Image (tube, rainbow, N blue to C red):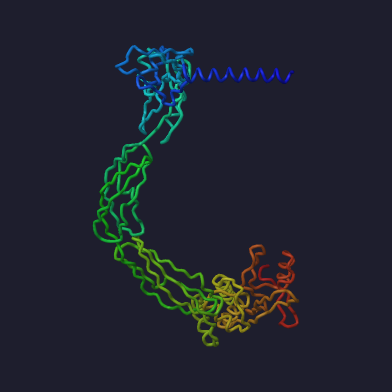
Amino acid sequence: MRKNRFSAISSAITSTVLLILILLTVGGALYSCSSGATTSDYTIITPSVNPGDTLTGDDFIMVAASVKGKYTATIDDPIDTSTPGTYPVLVTVKGNGIEKTYECKYTVRSYVREVVRLEAGFTNIDVNQFLDERVISAVGNVTAFIEDIDTIYTLGLGSYRVGVNVNGTTYYTTLIIRDTTPPVAEPVTVYIANKSNKPKPEDFVKNVVDATKVTYAFKENYDFDTTSEIPVTIILTDEGGNVTEIESLATCNVDNEPPVISGVKDIEVVVGGTISYKAGITVTDNSGEKISLKVDNSRVNLSKVGEYEITYSATDSAGNTTIVRAIVRVIDKPKATEEEMYALAEEIFYSFYDASMTQWELARAIFDWTHDNITYSDTVDTDDWVQAAYDGFMLRNGDCFTYASISQALLNIAGIKNMMIERLRYEGETMHYWNLVDIGDGYYHFDACWHSRKTPFNSFMRTDAELEAFCQKYDIEYYYRFDHSKYPARSDVSYYD
């Protein structure tokens, strides 16, 4: 029973739905404006109105002139035109025995324009540029301002969403900032005299005016390394893609002649010697300017026998460079003879000798010359006192053996009794040499070699006791340690008392 009753109800509902569909299809069918459904006598349209305007059914129908007045249209839903936008509405059209209902739309225009375009470089913005004049003139006076207007002045090219407040409500529009104006500039003639300073495209223009950033480029690849005038075309392109071509001129007077380096030759030097690399070398240039000479001797090792390359270079103001190479040959020291050594020693001796000098004064002069004119160096590798003295006179440097050898040579020429003395050293200790001198009062210690600044001492004509006192003072008892039995007795009377 319950099943039959439910079936009866279902049949009744189904019959009712079918009846409604038949009525809608045959008598007053529902159509959509967007489907384009029309009759041959009228057309359904989508009206646009200003805010606050009223709409009637006739605003949604466009009737042919031949049947004007035979059709009426009514709006089936409430109409609200206070807020801009597009809204749906049902509209019924009657006439000639036909009644049809359409799903239509109507548009309420906005107070602001859909798109606002501004040229880059604007300095003043008016809210009226963003308002729709048709709407404002129809509605009447409104209160409006652009929101975040200060930010707009900082924007570059592009598209932005901008809010405009009208009567207390924000409406949005699309702001497009564009650059449609090409750059403007004046040509500049560029003078080129130095091939190392290549001009840039922007050097050929001045007083460039554009609202956006401008880039510069040469229209062609120009060779400025010449002596002539060259027409130059500069292409200016702004951020908007606008292009301007400027015809300019390059006046080229490039110096392509390098300096001339004269006097370079191979050099031969004794190991441990010194070289004056620029002696006898000159540099000239067609410009007449003074050119600096550079020497690269970084590969030379004067303490080792061998051949080394050096380079001389000079560059003028036009960027022209000359490079000349030479060889430095470092050779072994030649074996010196006594005659050669004493020839050098006599030349030195007679530079300060005076016949009126006492033996003390003469010994002191020898001490002072040796002490003051020889630079201390640890490069001496000979135990031949003649060779050491010769090298010392030639190179003006050496170790304690050199000082003692030079002193011995000069004392010999002066006729002063002397002998060389050697430090008594133990394993791990360094050697040291000095002299014993007798000017008629017995032997005294004579050491022309430099002392450390931390241990100053005048070591001219000193007794054993004075040497020991020096060593004890600075806690360097080994410094003047020697085998007393190997040398003649020394005087114990101090010259300094």
How far across and how far down the image is residue 476, in percent? 73, 68
Q: Is residue 42 above or below residue 262?
A: above
Q: Quadrant of the C terminus?
A: bottom right
Side of 29 relative to 257 (left or right): right
Q: Quadrant of residue 52?
A: top left
Image point 25% across, 52% down: which residue? Answer: 249
Q: Is residue 289 above or below residue 56?
A: below
Q: Nearer the viewer, residue 184 or 187?
A: 184
Q: Quadrant of residue 399?
A: bottom right
Image point 74% across, 79% down: which residue? Answer: 483
How far across and how far down the image is residue 144, in percent? 42, 17
How far across and how far down the image is residue 65, in percent? 30, 17
Side of 372 relative to 452 (left or right): left
How far across and how far down the image is residue 447, in percent? 64, 73
Side of 412 relative to 116 (left or right): right
Q: Nearer the viewer, residue 286 or 357?
A: 286
Q: How many marks?
A: 0
Q: Quadrant of residue 160?
A: top left
Q: Nearer the viewer, residue 46 or 178?
A: 46
Q: Is residue 164 above or below residue 271?
A: above
Q: Nearer the viewer, residue 301 or 155?
A: 155
Q: Quadrant of the N terminus?
A: top right
